[in-house]
Image (cartoon, rainbow, N blue to C red):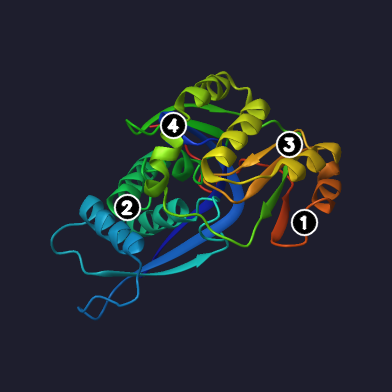
Amino acid sequence: MRGIGRATGAMTFLNALFTGIGAATALPLAVEVQARFQADPVPSAGASPLVTRAIEVGRTEWGGSETPRIQVEIRSEIPAGRGLKSSSAVASATLAAVADLLGAHPTPFEIARLSARVGRSVGLSATGALDDALAGLVDGVVVTDNRQDRWLLTHPVPPDWGAVVFVPDRTHPPSPTAVARFAGLRSSAQPVERMVLEGHLAPALDANGLLVESAMGYDFTEIRAAMGRAGAIAAGVSGMGPALVAVGPPDRLPSIGAVLPAEGRQFSVGRLGRGPMGGGRS
């Protein structure tokens, strides 16, 4: 007997560390988790605190005191620590797999809210990253209030948008270590918050990216300019970076990718925003 859970990575339009409001949409980088009851009563070694906590939360939420221990197997395509929401996706997919194993049927929003709780409890996310978790489970650009774990609204992704993702070969620190840096830019981010609430996604991507560069000490000025000349509509840092995402017409993606540095990795996405679970707001 096994349970299966799936989620994806995501890209950022507004980092919630600035104002508490976050906006993100799915990227087709998959996480799949298989959950099974554990025959050995001794806890398995090697599981990360994030995965261990997600299993515990899932057992408490959908099981009972007599529920056997659960072990999981995780397959992830998301590079960790680059701003592409690997932690949120792993937590969400683990919770979904535990729910499936226990015969529960939570909505994507319920899973995302629990994922945010897990992220906060293990110290990986200062806000819980509800926007990131939800974006990896549903379609569209989700906008959330991460201070209250509320799903505010969803914008459709422009149908003529693809993306090029540039992933430098370095990682970012956990978000709690950068709270003060982002808080200092709160007033500068408030116009970006209005942009995402009103659905002005391209300027929000640009403006949020500049603010994250300032907070984190990145400098992608030349790369963003080259992407723009190659046909990008907008470009910005995803999460806390260092991944950089440019959106543009699908037929321009090869040209946009061609101007990126040889260091690091890149991939193209023909269409944004397809979460694997679907589902409606709860």
Give the SS element for disc 3: loop
Precedes in sequence: disc 4 or disc 3: 3
Calculate the distance from the C-alpha at mark 4 to the C-alpha at mark 2. Answer: 21 Å
Give the SS element for disc 1: loop
In this figure, which residue is indicated by the disc labeled 3? 161
Q: Quadrant of the N terminus?
A: bottom left
Figure quadrant of residue 116: top left
State the residue at coordinates (63%, 22%).
200
- In this rendering, the answer to whether 40 lies above or below 130 is below
Q: With 27 as the anchor, is 129 left or right in this view?
A: left
Where does the image place residue 279, in percent across and percent down from the top left?
A: 48, 39
Where does the image place residue 162, in percent across and percent down from the top left?
A: 74, 41
Figure quadrant of residue 57: bottom left
Give the SS element for disc 4: loop
Q: With 110 as the anchor, is 264 left or right in this view?
A: right
In this figure, which residue is indicated by the disc labeled 4? 184
**Taking the image as drawn, is residue 80 in sight?**
yes
- In this rendering, the answer to whether 256 lies above or below 144 is below
- Between 208 and 30, the residue placed more toward the observer is 208
Q: Nearer the viewer, mark 4 or mark 3?
A: 4
